[in-house]
Image (cartoon, grey):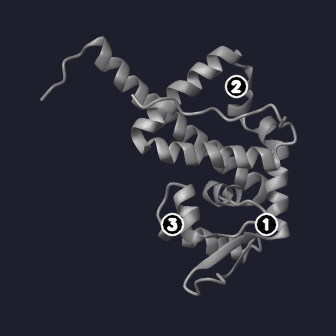
């Protein structure tokens, strides 16, 4: 059955295609950035960035943070452990659970990423160049879209993780900086 070609339908399809294209470009740029700088894949770098120094987490928790399957994470963990960037050890409360921690080498990559990211990743430069009101409107639209797709609770968890990463690693973070709150569900 053919959907009637209306302005609304056209805009919906354009938004979906643009979001998908932006994600592919971001993935390709991050993959190149991770490979050139550290010999990593974008997935390996994302996993390193999802860890907080001094706070071991389970592979299952990492999978949840990365919106992926635990089986995908286990392969990344093996490769990163082989490179000496993470360590894995048994949980003191549950022998079946392996906890993952950054090694000093993994922490160095994280710190270097936070220093380089703004200059080497074009998306940071572009988004910082937007007028504050336009950037805020874009963020609010994306928050509503993400809330629809993954739910308010997951969006809140994602924003909490971003805030923790920025506060831990961001040298330009000011006490006055606060993460955005998800608005009422619509």
Rendering coords of residue 172 (x, y %): 86, 36
Q: Residue at x 49, y 34 (%)?
A: 21
Rendering coords of residue 129 (x, y %): 74, 20
Binning the other alpha carbons within 10 Å of mark 3 as few (below 14), some (14 to 19) or many (20 upward) gives: few
Q: Residue at x 72, y 34 (%)?
A: 178
Rendering coords of residue 76 (x, y %): 60, 68
Q: In the image as oriented, which residue stretches furthest toward the bottom? A: 95
Q: Is residue 167 left or right of residue 152?
A: right
Task: Tell me how many marks there are.
Answer: 3
Q: Which residue is mark 1?
A: 54
Rendering coords of residue 166 (x, y %): 76, 44
Sequence-wise, the earlier of marks 2 and 1 is 1
* CA–CA distance in space, label 2 to label 1: 33 Å
Label 2 close to label 1 by CB (< 8 Å): no
Label 1 close to label 3 by CB (< 8 Å): no
Binning the other alpha carbons within 10 Å of mark 1 as few (below 14), some (14 to 19) or many (20 upward) gives: few
Q: Which image quarter is the N terminus in?
A: top left
Q: Which residue is mark 2?
A: 126
Q: Which residue is mark 3?
A: 72
* CA–CA distance in space, label 2 to label 3: 31 Å
Which residue occupies the foreground of this view, 182 or 126? 182
Which residue occupies the foreground of this view, 5 or 184? 184
Q: Considering only vertical position in the picture, is 51 above or below 176?
A: below
| Callout 3: SS | helix
């Amino acid at each position: 059955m053919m959907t009637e070609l209306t302005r609304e339908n056209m805009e919906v399809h354009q938004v979906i295609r643009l979001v998908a294209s932006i994600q592919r470009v971001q993935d390709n740029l991050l993959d190149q950035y991770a490979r050139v700088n550290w010999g990593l894949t974008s997935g390996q770098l994302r996993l390193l960035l999802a860890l907080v120094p001094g706070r071991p987490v389970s592979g299952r928790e990492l999978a949840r943070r990365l919106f992926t399957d635990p089986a995908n994470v286990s392969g990344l963990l093996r490769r990163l452990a082989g490179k000496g960037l993470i360590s894995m050890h048994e949980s003191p409360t549950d022998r079946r659970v392996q906890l993952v921690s950054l090694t000093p080498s993994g922490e160095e990559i994280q710190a270097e990423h936070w220093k380089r990211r703004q200059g080497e990743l074009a998306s940071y430069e572009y988004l910082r160049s937007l007028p504050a009101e336009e950037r805020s409107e874009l963020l609010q639209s994306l928050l509503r879209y993400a809330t629809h797709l993954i739910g308010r609770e997951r969006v809140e968890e994602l924003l909490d993780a971003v805030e923790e990463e920025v506060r831990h690693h961001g040298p330009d973070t000011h006490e006055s900086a606060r993460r955005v709150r998800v608005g009422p569900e619509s």
